[in-house]
Image (cartoon, coloured by chain):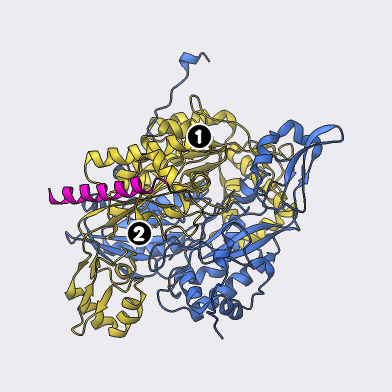
Amino acid sequence: MAKKIYETPMLDELENGPWPSFISGFKRMRDQHPDQRISAMSNSLLGQLEHSYETRKGYWKGGTVSVFSYGGGIIPRFSEVGKTFSESKEFHTIRIQPPAGNHYTTEMLNQLADTWEKYGSGYTTYHGQSGDIMFIGIDTENIQNFFDEVNEYGWDLGGAGPAVRTSMSCVGAARCENSCTNEHALHRRLVNEFTDDIHRPALPYKFKFKVSGCPNDCVNSIERSDFSVIGTWRDDMKIDQGEVKAFIEAKGRDYVLDNVTSRCPTNCIKLNDDNTLTVDNHECVRCMHCLNVMNKALSPGDDKGVTILIGGKRTLKIGDLMGTVIVPFMKMETEEDYEKIVELGAEAIDFFAENALEHERTGEMIERIGLANFLEGLGVDVDPNMISSPRKSSYIRMDGWDEEAEKWFQRKAEEKAAAVA
Amino acid sequence: MALEDMRHPIESGCPDGFQYMHPAMRKNFGQWKYHEHPRPGVLLHVAESGDEIWTVKAGTQRILDLFSLRKLTEIGDKYGEGYVRFTIRSNIEYLLADKSKVEPLIKALEDAGFVVGGTGNSVAMISHTQGWLHCDIPASDASGVVKALMDELIDDFKNCNMPNRVHIATSCCQINCGGQADLAINIQHTKPPKIAHDLVGNICERPTVVARCPVAAIRPAVVDGKPSLEVDEKKCICCGACFPPCPPMQINQPEHSKMAIWVGGNHSNARSKPTFQRLVASGIPNNPPRWPEVATVVKKILNAYKEGARDWERMNDWIERIGWPRFFEVTGLPFTKYHIDNWRGSRDSLNASTHIRF
């Protein structure tokens, strides 16, 4: 290396200890990578990071960078101390959408690494909190080259800024016995219908879809997405009484009493004297706890579908919000079912685009206008599954009561007629 | 370059994962029967067809340099079957149909310095953000905090000694990109932003910044003859929301941006409904390169949880059962006026009953 190697006494401390060290990785790239551009970039990056550690401050600034015909997908980073640390003065991140379920072959990972080595810093994260593959560290000039090459073999940019964002889905049906829907297909249908809204940010703020295959919600969709889709079932859960007995044989009755039946949130599961289990499925809220403990003996029913919750987000600006139920149950089997959910997604995005204030998330907008108005906007009927309790405030004008009650009875009659037919 | 000569993107969106999925997973898609957990870091899933898929999970440094990424793929080719996936906490999972490959694969991963574990009742890999390495608004680092903490918690990652799984997250500003977790380590600013008045007029779109403030503490002002913004410091809650749209409103401060710890966030619907994390400790120094004061508090809480929680209780379940007064008692953490929420909806967090444990 021609240029001096920055001293990194503080970062060196992060090479100690048994957990793999990212600093050791940076130094390998600095000292061993044959490409002078990459080794110099690593040296410069280490220098700036050490400077951050010493001064306890960050030195990256945003900007506006994208690829031809898109408006987002890149996180631009320009160094405020780029005069000193010049080889990493432009250090943008490229967000690439991962495949649904985050599956890769080693061959594909190597191919991505090869392209990244040609144009970028060589640093990646699988995946960032947005769900994207993060290709961290590239100068402005090379962004288009990198994108063009990976785009040719099947990869596209993710979302950034006020746009529909990259989605995440759990491993689901690919490996999990609790999967109640095809997370993979749902994930792709939902985001790929809105690629224009991903690539050209034009919404009030971000809009995220996430898909989990069961109420364990392994991708945190209720907390972390504006549009959360979660697999569930509505018929009886399946009980293999032979496996129940085998479980008791191995663990004992007390274990089942302490860890299964007494932990049921609705007290709907009972251990019988003959070491079988009885479930009152009408009372079961599909919380998954008993299935998690006794995964061989208990499994979801056959009448599967999804629940949709809307409005989850983190702190800024009005405080944390969970998504809340908009659709208690929806079958997800036929092409029509998929079209229906995509349509609901489109309605939700359109309503958000038209009604949210700048930098306001869907959940905040609902908080501001009230759920009933949001439902009306989407053309979704009210349902008691949407609330944990009815209103406690009497301050409301209710002169439309009779009509609303009539709507309810009419809908119930229609449902009954449909069930008979 | 003329516009017509520029390459137009192929708007392919999210790729189809099936093309990269292990053949046994493709074949048995939606047909899995049960799973077992033979040892920490290893899962066995069995399909209705009787087919098996073995998963070996390993923790990494998350920011992967080319050498580390290629080492992971090389191990996957030599000891695995060429198919991997990543969890949402950035662990790598190797998928194997052949059981006999499990042990040699584990050995190869461990020999290369990666850490096999993170399954079942372990302390999972910490989900984290970019910090000083790449973020434009960080008060702290992310990868460094995580590396230092995982050095301390590695045995709890490699073993399953906790009452239930423990998810930890770190975030380097109050936006909390690390997300909800059983235990979250977040930055908490304690002083209003320091404004570079000579820069505001040129850099910031002032109405946007005024609108961004959750407590309406910012208003336009002219300072030294230049258009700028001023903050009513009595109203300011030091959240930092004005800083991203207006970098001259510097919120990060080496001394006064502190680390805070929150517990009890749980995304699962199992047992209780999903819960948000709650503040338990703050005022912890932002102390690079290894943040030892953070580890002390984290370990205190984890030890109390490990000691006191029953099987299957997540952090929130445990605290719900023993009550918050007991939580502060067993962890030895101080309870202050700052623990009492005063944000919208906060009365719901007060005790409107005589339910008191003595």
Q: Which chain is blue?
A: B
For residue A394, say whether it is visible: yes
**What residue is shown with label 2?**
A215
Q: Which of the numbered marks, if any, corresponds to residue A203?
A: 1
- In the image, residue A250 lies at what x, y percent? 26, 81
How would you rate the neighbour count of disc 2 (Cα within 10 Å): few for under 14, some for 14-19, many for 20 or more? many
Q: Nearer the viewer, residue A176 or B20?
A: A176
Q: Is residue A413 magenta?
A: yes
Type of amino acid under label 2:
Pro
Q: Quick one: SS at disc 1?
A: loop
- In the image, residue B272 lies at what x, y percent? 41, 67
Type of amino acid under label 1:
Leu
* Count of labels in the image: 2
Instruction: Give the image quarter of residue B303.
Output: bottom right
Q: Which chain is yellow?
A: A
**Residue A121 versus residue A199 in the image, above or below:** below
- Earlier along the polypeptide chain: callout 2 or callout 1? 1
Q: Nearer the viewer, residue B134 or A9?
A: B134
Q: Residue at x 64, y 45 (%)?
A: A45
Q: Quick one: SS at disc 2?
A: loop
Pointers 2 and 1 within a single chain? yes
Residue bounds of the magenta highlight: A398-421
- In the image, residue A27 lies at what x, y percent? 61, 51
Q: Are marks 2 and 1 in contact (CB under 8 Å)?
A: no
Work out which residue is located at the far right of the displayed protein and give it: B224
- In the image, residue B117 lies at what x, y percent? 43, 66
- Left/right placement of residue A177 relative to residue B11 reads left
Q: Residue at x 48, y 63 (%)?
A: B275
**Dominant secondary structure of the residues highlighted in magenta in the image:** helix
- Left/right placement of residue B7 relative to residue B174 reads left
How would you rate the neighbour count of disc 1 (Cα within 10 Å): few for under 14, some for 14-19, many for 20 or more? many
For residue B88, say whether it is visible: no
